[in-house]
Image (cartoon, coloured by chain):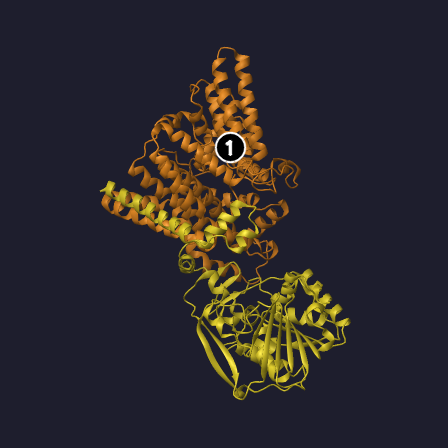
Amino acid sequence: MVSLEFLYFFLPVFMGVYALSGVRFRKAVFLLGTVVLCLWVSTWGIIPMVVCAVVSYFCGRLIHRFADKKGLKRLWLILSVVANMAVLLVFIRSGHSSYDVTSIFTGKGAMLKLFPVWGAGVFTLHGISYCMDIYREEIEPEKNFLLVSQYICFFPCFYCGPILRFSDISEQLRKPVITSGKLAEGIKLMLIGFAEKLFLSDPMYEMWQHIRGVSADSLSAACAWLGIIAFSFAFYYELRAYSHIAQGIGSMLGFELPDNFDLPFMSAGFNELIKRFACTFYSWVRDYFYRPICRSKDSVCLWALILSVLAGSVWYGYGRHTMLWAAFICVMLGIEYLLKNILAAVPTWVRCAVMNVLFLIGLPFLAIDSLPSACGYVAAMFGGGSFAGDVLASYVIKTGVVMYLICGFFATGIGRYLKRRIMQLNTNIVYIIEPMLTIGFLLISTAFLVGGGNSSMNLFVR
Amino acid sequence: MKKAADYIAVSAFFVIVIMFAAYTLVMGRHGSESEKADSSDIRHNVQTYVSSNFPLSSNWKSLRTTMFVMTGKKNFDNIYILKNRLVEITDFDKDRLDKNISQINEFSENTDTPVYVMLAPTAAGIYSAKLPAYTSNTDQREMIDNIYYDLDSRIDTIDTFFPMYSARNNYVYYRTDRKWTSFGAYFAYADGIKELGFEPVVLSNYDQEYTSNSYYGGLYSELCYNSIGADRVNIFRSKYKTTVDSVELYRGDQVLTSKSVYFRSALKTADKTAIFLQGDNFTKATVKTTAEDAPKLLIIKGSYANTLVPFLTPHYSEITLVDPDKLKEEGKTLSDVADTSAYDQILFMYDCDQFADETNFDLLK
């Protein structure tokens, strides 16, 4: 999505047709746009999506139809979940040919080298969520097939969320209203996303690869820390960027999508972190994975928790080693749970700092492909490497300090705070600045797309 | 107030986007050669079309580079911005290099003509001390020494690292390109020609002519970084009558003839260094001189050789350059274009990067 073709050619044409067609036809136009984009990614990639949409639509209706016959009702639910899960597991990493679900267990390269399917990690979750909600009788099944498929195949979210709920979005889908305010906000959010991806995430990832290229034995502690911080920023801003883009395009089309991130690095503990990092995905796992396994509402089911974290990590991660990352998060959650009485007495900022440090210590397991080298990297973070002349660290600091500061600035939410303060002082200043920012971001994004080529480093994207 | 601002933002966004998109579509060059070559993948074609036809390309690049430089960034992939020049560091494939060395050894076994190898360092090798210390920059002195050591003892090797290194404070490499300048080539020549059995012509015999002072080379066009000034393209003209009699460039079925080794028409194009024998655009070039009794030289050329040839002309009756990459394109071998036994000396003239990457030495038979 972050490409010249999308920004300069697809988007204006699509927006033009969408805005000019009447409210009745917007669903069809939207789906047409989705089809075009899917075909653009791969010719056959559209089939699994259509299958998921059709299966979810009919299963939803059948679940409702047999609401009083428990067995049949459950059968249709299982059918839809199995179909969606199968698509999810087979295609989630299909864009990255070197890994897929089989490689998680065998540790080898992908066995199923199928065509890439755009958004396999998102439309399947939408489908499951839709059917489960009908099964729980929280929503009525929708008769309009286009509306259901628009919800399931909501392409702005296809990279990494936000994961939508039918109950939240169905009213908006019925009557999308485009206003100048929503358009302006949407354009701004989308371009912020572009800038985050191109100006923050990509250079940070390059920095990480730079440091990663040094063997762990000769890596100094300072450098190892700088490297893993760069990775964490790259990871965060990549997901953040795509969720901003999703929100932005959604807003341009007349929908209000939930925010996916709530300053995760400011949370005071891992429990809070996973809630604030991709919030919508967290609540999806909670409602449709954790809850069905763990029936009791009060106590914590250990197994359900561990399984949920595992499932979540598989969704995020890209290889067998993500299991280690999941295990690490589980251990941290466990420790936090056991120590919760003691932790309550610790000031929030201390807990936040400790959480961030621990998070960074665990992150190499997510970032690095093999267990020995991940362990080697963690060892290097504690001075396991030799200290023979720390030229690299000083070079990284000299050339990258501004980037680190910018990343940190926005990750801690100072920008958001400043905007609020200025709004309190004088709202007009913000109104004058925002169009200029929008155009500024457009120019920056274009410069990066033309100068650096289309961003090819879609590492964390499903 | 908010409403007005929103209208401004929205309309400005769409106006800018549609303007650029329309410009790209209307003014774009349709169906260039590279696009036709792989028309199977429509996505790829569209991407190439858009990125190659998007307006103000160099300005966008420049904006990106400037923004990164403002944050303190010094390297863009392998290109480093030093105080007064752009330098590209390269890595080489050891297996490929070993293969090249053995192919040259084999070549020298199969010919009676003496074979010489002259490998020039690139700017990354000469200015390595100015690069950040940790970079994975190849030590080119060591690299060239190792190559020379691995070459058969029958092959004479010509050291250029030392003369280039001693002359490093002069204008020996373009600041915005990967190549060396005429001046650089002269230093390599002045030292190396002794190995070939001649005394160098002293510099005072030449007039330096600045043919262009607005050359922006290949490294510049990757970044469009404007704080590094344009390069000068200098040529050296003998103060006395030039010995060059005729120059013939062969490319496919075409033959281009000229009276001079300098092709001034290249100054009007982007690659101004093509003033030296048209750059890398020919399969075979023959330079004939008035010194009819002098020996004949065959050069297996890399890009660096063109700049060196003008200095060699006083010593030879005929200099033939053959480009293995172009042989490959035309599906020929060396024997199709030149008879090695007709020459008195054979010289491999490469810079060490191109030498290590060269894949077509197997066509030298």
Nearer to me, A375 or A286: A286
Locate residue A211 relative to residue B64 in the image: left or right: right
Q: Is residue A416 above or below residue B224?
A: above
- According to the picture, the residue beneath numbered tag 1 turns out to be A338
Residue B354 pos. (x, y %): 61, 66
Chain A shade in the render: orange
For the residue labelled by badge 1, is the local secondary structure a helix, a strand or a loop? helix
Residue B325 pos. (x, y %): 63, 64
Q: Residue furthest top?
A: A68
Tell me which amino acid carries mark 1.
Leu
Nearer to me, A7 or A137: A7
Residue A445 pos. (x, y %): 40, 50
Q: What crowding class fits label 1: few (fewer than 14 Cα within 10 Å), some (14-19), or many (20 or more)?
A: few
Q: Is residue A233 above or below residue B214?
A: above
For the image, the number of numbered tags is: 1
- The picture quadrant where one finds residue B4 is top left
Q: Which chain does yellow denote in the image?
A: B
Residue at coordinates 73% horizontally, 67% vertically from top-left? B365
Label 1: chain letter: A
Residue A3 pos. (x, y %): 45, 47
Task: Using the rendered image of the protein, determine whether residue A224 is visible from the camera's viewpoint.
Answer: no
Q: Is residue B80 above or below residue A403?
A: below
Locate residue B198 relative to residue B31 in the image: left or right: right
Task: Using the rendered image of the protein, determine whether residue A194 is visible from the camera's viewpoint.
Answer: yes
Nearer to me, B87 or A152: A152
